[in-house]
Image: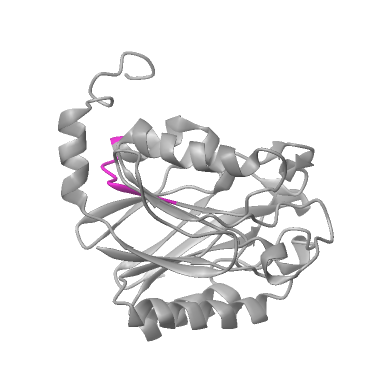
Amino acid sequence: MRIALSQITTGPEPERNLALLREQAGRAAEADARLVVFPEAAMACFGTRLGPLAEPLDGPWATEVRQIAEDTGLVVVAGMFTPAPHGRVTNTLLATGPGVETSYDKIHLYDAFGFTESRTVAPGSKVVTFDLDGVRVGLATCYDVRFPELFRAHADAGAQLSLLPASWGAGPGKREQWELLIRARALDATVWLAAVGQADPAATGLAPTSSAPTGIGHSALIGPDGTVRERLEAGPGLLVGDVDPDEVAAVRRSVSVLANRRLGTS
């Protein structure tokens, strides 16, 4: 299955970001992808007041994403914000397209490195997968990558591919952590892992206006053996790669870490 990872820099205006999603989805379709994955906060970048922008899954922004999926024939995965109780929002991934309609609410909130996502964002609680062309796909978001149990839950649900949209925070050692963690999670669960982050705003000449996590780039497609198959640098780009589900079965026969577990299993 051919997939595309769209490493973009989104701004504070959802309508302008939709135009960017449409352009990128068109490029992915031209590359014969079946799935295009956009970063976390594709609706509006962090550092924006999210409450006034949040919309339900049947609202105008998500409806337009569905239209993009229909027009291109792709399954589209994109990060957005939906309303939550007590004035907070939910950090949501919308997955929509031919035969697919689901969403995932980020479980692990980024209360780390001086940022407190839980002040404005409510956590999710459900593991979410969907099927595309005979491949089961798990959904995760950014800080989730630090929690291997979620990716093993994907594998336990039958997933061969995990998608990880992100808007990774910058700082000393953060790129190294990102690259280590995405490879480790692929190995932990012996799944393909498609990690797509917001591009580094500085790579396009945009100066940071806050300490919010606005992306460092370095999206990558990781094989189930933990090897990097395709990668991008800091700036915007479209990564297109092929996922072979048979390779998952081969790696699991060779390195049976799921079958050999002794802790955390029922």
Segment tinted magenta in the rendering: 156-163
Q: Which residue is painted at 48% across and 47% down in the image?
A: 140
Please give the name of the residue rendered at 32% of the width and 62% of the height, measured from the top-left corner: 241
Residue 15 falls in image quadrant: bottom right
* Quarter that holds the N terminus: bottom left
Tell me the quarter of the picture where residue 258 sits. top left
115 drawn magenta: no
Nearer to the camera, 151 or 91: 151
* Image coords of residue 24 (percent x, y): 48, 78
8 lies left or right of 160: right
- The residue lying at 22 percent from left, 27 percent from top is 255
- 38, above or below 147, in the image: below
- Would you say residue 161 sits in the magenta stretch? yes
Instruction: Please give left or right for residue 157 compared with residue 50 in the image.
Output: left
Q: Position of residue 113 (x, y in %)?
A: 74, 36
Q: Quick check: can you spot residue 11? A: no
